[in-house]
Image (spheres, rainbow, N blue to C red):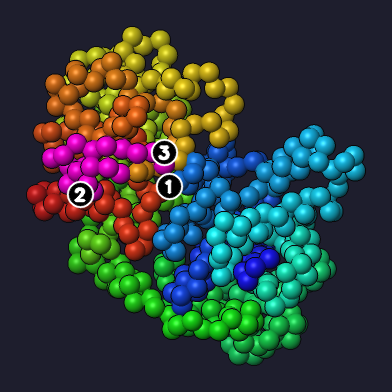
Amino acid sequence: MGSTKYVFVTGGVTSSLGKGIISASLGKLLQARGFSVTIQKFDPYINVDPGTLNPYEHGECYVTDDGAETDLDLGHYERFLNVATSQANNVTTGRIYYNVITKERKGDYLGKTVQVVPHITDEIKRNFQALGNDKNYDIIITEIGGCVGDIESLPFIEALRQFRWDVGPSNLLVIHLTLVPYLSAAGELKTKPTQHSVKHLLEAGVQPDILVCRSEKRLPVDLRKKIALFCNVNYNSVIQAIDADTIYDVPLMMRKEKLDERVLSKLRLGTKSEVQIESWREFLGRHKNPTDEVEVGLVGKYVELPDSYKSISEAFVHAGAENECRVHLKYISSDTITEDNVGEVLDGLHGILVAPGFGERGMVGKIEAARYARENQIPYFGICLGMQCAVIEFARNVLGLKDAASSEMEIDSKNLVIDLMEDQKKVINKGGTMRLGAYQCKIKTGTKIHQAYGKTKISERHRHRYEFNNKYLARFEKAGMIMSGVNPETNLVETIELSDHPWFIGTQYHPELKSTVLNPHKLFVKFVKAALEHKGKIN
């Protein structure tokens, strides 16, 4: 088993309490003390991964360097810890059952009846430890998705119960995140939901060591004592987590509550060093005290659920702080934009970002947004489909190819300037079959992309099936669209920009996936700077 310690984070009462943020915040504090930490997420749904889920159903699909399509919480882990995650950091019920059934078909169980206990729980426990097989982490934090008491979560909770005795009680700790609601009519906080949530855990054989209580009000001493008494935990292990102005406040709030100290004490780990978190405080200072502000329009198909673009919105937080600027994101449904109203909808914006997406719906609005930005010299940032829309718009209105299109939307067009990648044409299955993960990009010197990165070789993450059609390459470049970045092995166009525009850039890859608090993505930093400069021109 090694010397690795395990921290499990479970949740009760309701979803969306913030298990991912608490896990990431604890991880940040432990990392800031000098410990080697990683975080993983176990999701109870039966999909093998979130790759085929509708963003309205599950929020954004986060992609790792090794090409895994994962839960959006992995984005929080990376943004807080500034450490890359992988396929092993996100495991679903679907993957667990898939692995077990595959073994059964191969005869690995020697004819035995395959059951939830022990076969499913054994596979879950194997995955609990998988991350530690390659690297010797001091602490592995495991977030278990869903709520305690859900049918879907039962195998994970049972595996947790068994795992405590496999590794020894002093090597494992359970943090339970729960809700202490405030009833305005009664004028008081209520502990009963927390008591019932812990009762569900106890019935499954798991005693939480620490309770983190989400609330909109501070928890008085008497109420903490009551929770401790009825939930069988120490008084100083009842941690309050009141609503914060920003998720980036949470590590400092948890530090004030001494969550990291309680974890280290219960795991019998000595303190390696005091918390070194000055750079985090400096980031928060810049974020909360901007000297300027800009308004950026995020044009997308799924704007009714902002979590669909979580990494983009957080990248703007990082880039805004770097520029000492508050970025106000205006979420704009591309379905509402037409040729007739585009000026009215996008009027007054200091920058326009056209977001990724799939399918024909909303394409007209995205293409019109690209045209409006190009013609009016407004800073433009197109990501994945946003780059492809800029290419289609340029082909139609500059090159004169009025039927220019993508084969994703209009297969019968004679001018498919965006086409299905060759290696995708025989693909039938949808899940996990796109061009996924990190690929190299060679950048042309003297371009705005080169100025942003300051180097000619980069690696960025991808998630797409369609690409720029190189048959049209010479015509585009002659008309002023620069193919500023290409994949050195396939010549796939990775980035485009306009030579006669202050800042008009499109990327086939997803730069937002590599932006963190301590390393804001350079393209977002430059885009915000360009928006500030545009604001100065029009004011």
Q: Work out whether mark 3 precedes mark 1 in sequence or the reverse, and give the earlier one.
A: 1
Q: Kindly identify which residue carries mark 2.
A: 454
Residues under numbered marks 1 and 2 in contact, where contact means CB atoms less than 8 Å apart:
no
Q: Is residue 441 magenta?
A: yes
Query: The N terminus lies in which quarter of the figure?
Result: bottom right
Which x, y percent locates residue 436? 47, 37
Q: Is residue 160 at all visible to an observer of this figure?
A: yes
CA neighbours of label 2 inside 10 A, class few (<14), some (14 to 19), many (20+): some
**Mark carried by residue 462:** 3
Which x, y percent locates residue 89? 57, 53
How far is the residue under mark 3 from the one under mark 1?
15 Å
Residue type indicated by callout 2: Gly
- Which residues are the magenta region? 438-458
Q: Kindly identify which residue carries mark 1.
A: 309
Residue type indicated by callout 1: Tyr
Give the residue at x 62% y 69%: 4
